[in-house]
Amino acid sequence: NIVSTVNLGCKLNLQKIALHARNAEYNPKRFAAVIMRIREPRTTALIFSSGKMVCTGAKSEEQSRLAARKYARVIQKLGFPAKFTEFRIQNMVGSCDVKFPIRLEGLVLAHGQFSSYEPELFPGLIYRMVKPRIVLLIFVSGKVVLTEILGHDTNMYYIEIGAKVRDEIYEAFDNIYPILKGFRKT
């Protein structure tokens, strides 16, 4: 899952957008943004009256940029002078299943300097890898979520930076997998 942001560079009338755009919902009492969805690429956008937009759900950096452009086009077609500026990939999340249960208590004891596990508060072990700087959520079931907060200005280099983070996520998994095998529940 990729989370990106873009600045449309103009103020927006959210009521007008909700009334005239398809697949758009707006309930200002619940949330101060229009929620809009498109099917291809399958994504959701949060569109704020300030002209700022958050796009979630894309499976790649390219898809995220394409989706954000499509939302901007919808806004333009409704008569707003929307531009496409300050596109940024903010966050990238990967997930996988190692297909075996994991002894989280043993893992936190052996890797305490990198991990925290408080099952009363959260069912997963939080593992903060130093190199690469990736945070992993590891669950007893063998499911693993990997993420890195980006915040890079990616106007020109969003694919290169995204690819770097994607490589770091893969590297983090390659690093953690042998450790997880050592704490496999039998």
Image (cartoon, rainbow, N blue to C red):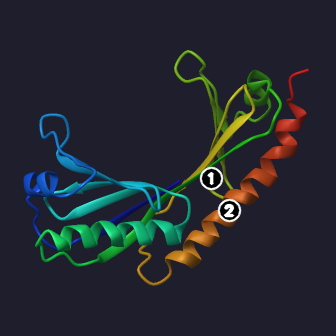
Q: In this view, does 146 lie to the left or right of 122?
A: right
* Figure check: 29 above or below 38: above
Residue at the image point whose x is 73% and y is 29% from the top: 108
Q: In this view, does 111 lie to the left or right of 41?
A: right
> What's the mark number on residue 26?
none
Q: How crowded is mark 2: few (under 14 residues within 10 Å), some or many (20 or more)?
A: some
| Residue 83 image point, x, y percent | 22, 78
| Residue 143 image point, x, y percent | 70, 35
Closer to the camera in the image, 72 or 87: 72
> Is residue 107 something that shows in the picture?
yes
| Residue 155 image point, x, y percent | 41, 80
Q: Residue 50 appears in which quarter of the rendering?
A: bottom left
Closer to the camera in the image, 118 or 85: 85
Whether the residues at callouts 2 and 1 have beta carbons within 8 Å, the answer is yes
Q: Work out which residue is located at the far bottom of the displayed protein and give it.
A: 156
Label whose residue precedes the other's in the sequence (2 or 1)? 1
Residue at the image point whose x is 56% and y is 73% from the top: 161
> Is residue 131 something that shows in the picture?
no
Q: Which residue matches tag 2? A: 168
Which amino acid type corresponds to the residue marked 1 in the rendered image? Ile
* Figure check: 118 above or below 183: above
Query: Residues under labels 2 and 1: Cα distance?
Result: 7 Å
Q: Residue 115 appears in which quarter of the rendering?
A: top right
- The local secondary structure at tag 1 comes to strand
Residue at the image point whose x is 83% and y is 30% from the top: 100
Q: Which residue matches tag 1? A: 134
Closer to the camera in the image, 110 or 148: 148
Q: Work out which residue is located at the far top of the displayed protein and give it.
A: 120
Which amino acid type corresponds to the residue marked 2 in the rendered image? Glu
Q: Residue 112 appears in which quarter of the rendering?
A: top right
Q: In this view, does 161 lie to the left or right of 90?
A: right
